[in-house]
Image: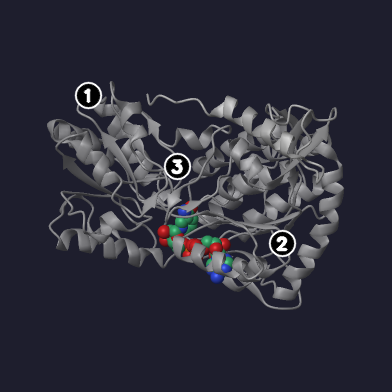
Amino acid sequence: MTEHLTPSTEPAVSSTVVREGPTFESLNPRNGDVVGVHPIHSADEVNAAVERARLAAIWWRDLGFEGREDFLLQWRSVVTRRMAQLAHISHLETGKPHSDAQLEIALAIDHIHWAAKNAKKSLGQHKVPSGIMMANQHASVRYNPLGVVGVIGPWNYPVFTPLGSITYALAAGNAVVFKPSEYTPGVGQWLVDTFTEVVGGRPVLQLVTGMGETGNALCTANIDKLAFTGSTATGKKVMAACAENLTPVVIEAGGKDSLIVDEDADLSAAADAALWAGMANAGQTCIGTERVYVHRAVFEPFMDELLQRARALRAADDTESKIGPITMPSQLDVISRHIDDAIAQGGRVVLGGPEAVGERFVQPTIITHVPETSSAVTEETFGPTLVVNPVDDMDEAVRLTNATSYALAGAVFSKRNGVRIAERIRSGMTSVNSVIAFAAVPGLPFGGVGESGFGRIHGVDGLREFTYAKSITRQRFKPLLNLTTFDRDAKTDKTAATLISLLYGGRKTIR
Ligand code: NDP
C-alpha cells in the first residue's frame, strides 16, 4: 500500500476479490453504487482462519508486552498517516460525511496508543498482599492472553467500534479473527491489511467476511472468546451459539440513552449537544441521544435553542451536508414506525415528521410530549430523531431514564448537580455537561448493563476482558502454623482458631 494517499488518488474499491466461491457486494448507501466485492466465507474457511490464528497467537504472545507495543505503535502510525484513505472507504460504505469518518478514526488511533502503552502496567505480574494467615507466602497475579479472540463488528462506526475490542485483545497478547458487518467489509479489510503489513504478513489479525452465517461460524469455531457489537437481538443469538463450546462473550448491544437538562443548565450548550448526539451519523450511534428530559421550568427556552439549530440541519448527498444517509435500508421502516407511533400516541411534531423519511435519507425529526409507552421511547430508533419530554424535577428525569430495558450511556446538563444526577443513572457511562466524552477517554471502561450487554472494552477493564487471571503463590519460609498437612494436630487447630478470633472476632459497630 502507498502511504499519504488522498481520497482523490485512491481507488474507490478497497478490496476487489477475484475468487472461486460465493461473494457479496458492499454498496454505497448514498446512491447504491457497488463499492467492493468480498467473499462469503464458509464455516470451513472460518475454522481454517482460526487454526492459522492459533499458531500466530503463540508468536504474538511470546513477543511480550514490549514487542507487541512496538508493532502496535507502528500500526498506530500507519493508520494515522493513511487516515484519509481509510476515511474515504468508510465514507463510501457507510455514507457518513468524510469529516465524521476522520473523527472516528482519530479517536480509534488514541485507543491504539493507550492500549499499547498501558498493557504491561495493567496486565503484567504484580504483587498482592498475602494477608496475616499466609504471611509466609509471596502472592502475585498476572493476566495472560486467552489465545484467539473472535470479533464481530457493526457498520455504524466500522473503525472505532470493532477496534475497541480488536486493539485491546491484541495488546493483551491474543490473535484476532474479525468479521465486519456485511455493510462495511472494505473498512475491515483495510484495517486487517495494514496490521498484517506491519507484522510481516503473519496472521495475527485476520478477516472473514460474509453474512450472519459467517458470524455464526465464528461463534462456534475453536475460539477462546467472542466480542460482539450490534443489536440486542443478534447478541442473544451470538451468546446462544457461543454457549455450545462454553465460549465466553462480550456483548456491546444497543441503547436508548437519554440526555437530562436541569433547570440550572447552560441551555445553549445542552441544546447543541442534544442535537449533535441525536443526529450525528444520522442518529446511528449506540451511545447517541434518543430521548431528552428537560426540567419543565426551562422547557420552552430549551426548545427554542434546539429548534433554532435543528432547522439549519439537512440530510443530503452533497459535501456540505452534515448528515448522510441511513446505512442499512431496512432501518428506514423502523424509523418510520417509531415516528408514526409517537404521533398516534399524542406526540407533537415540532420538526420533520413522517414525510422526513425518504428513500435513503431521513431529515431531522423532533417530537415532544411523547408518552413513555410509545416505541419511540422504548425501542432503539437508530435514526436522526429526538423525543423531547418535559419533567417536573430531576427525580422524574432519573426515573424515566432508568425505566428502559437498555442501560448503555447518557448525559446530564446541570451546573450544580450534574455528577449527583449522573450517579443515579443506571448505565455504564454518563458524561456531565458534554456528550459521549467517556468514549474518547481511553482509560475509561466502555460497556452497558441490562439489554445493552455486559463486559467492558477500553481501559484496564477492556484489556483484562481478553485475558485470564493467573495467580501464583511462592512460599518464602516455612509457616509457623502448617495448615495444609495431615500432620496438623489439635493444638495447631486451636492456635488457628484463636488467631482468627483475635483478628476478626471483635464487635463491629455499624456506621
Ligand atoms: P446486527 O446485530 O444484526 O449485526 C451486527 C453484527 O452481527 C454484524 O456483523 C452482523 O453481520 C452480525 N450477525 C448477524 N447475525 C448474526 C448471527 N446469527 N451470528 C453472528 N453474527 C451475526 O445489527 P444490524 O446491522 O442488523 O442492525 C440492526 C439494529 O441493531 C440496528 O437497527 C440498531 O438498532 C442495532 N445496532 C446497534 C449497534 C450498536 O453499536 N449498539 C450497532 C449496529 C446496530 P451482517 O452485517 O453480515 O449481518
Q: Furthest-front residue in view?
A: 490
Q: Is residue 485 visible?
A: yes
- Residue ID for mark 3: 428
Question: Which label was assigned to residue 223?
Answer: 2
Q: Is mark 3 within 8 Å of ligand 1?
A: no
- Of badges 3 and 1, nearer the viewer stands 3
Q: Is residue 497 above or below residue 149?
A: above
Q: Position of residue 126 (x, y in %)?
A: 74, 30
Q: Earlier in the sequence, mark 2 or mark 3?
A: 2
Q: Quadrant of the C terminus?
A: top left
Q: Residues within 10 Å of mark 3 (few under 14, many from 20)?
A: many
- Of badges 1 and 2, nearer the viewer stands 2
Q: Is residue 42 above or below residue 366?
A: below
Helix, strand or loop at label 1? It is loop
CA separation in Å, label 2 and label 3: 27 Å
Which quadrant of the view contains residue 355? bottom left
Q: Position of residue 163 (x, y in %)?
A: 62, 46
| Disc 1 and disc 2 in contact, CB within 8 angstroms | no
- Amino acid residing under circle 3: Gly
CA separation in Å, label 1 and label 2: 51 Å
- Residue ID for mark 1: 264
Q: Position of residue 96 (x, y in %)?
A: 48, 50
Closest to the observer: 464 or 187?
464
Residue at the image point whose x is 70% and y is 68% from the top:
221
- Amino acid residing under circle 2: Ile
Closest to the observer: 40 or 70?
70
Question: Which label was assigned to residue 148?
Answer: none
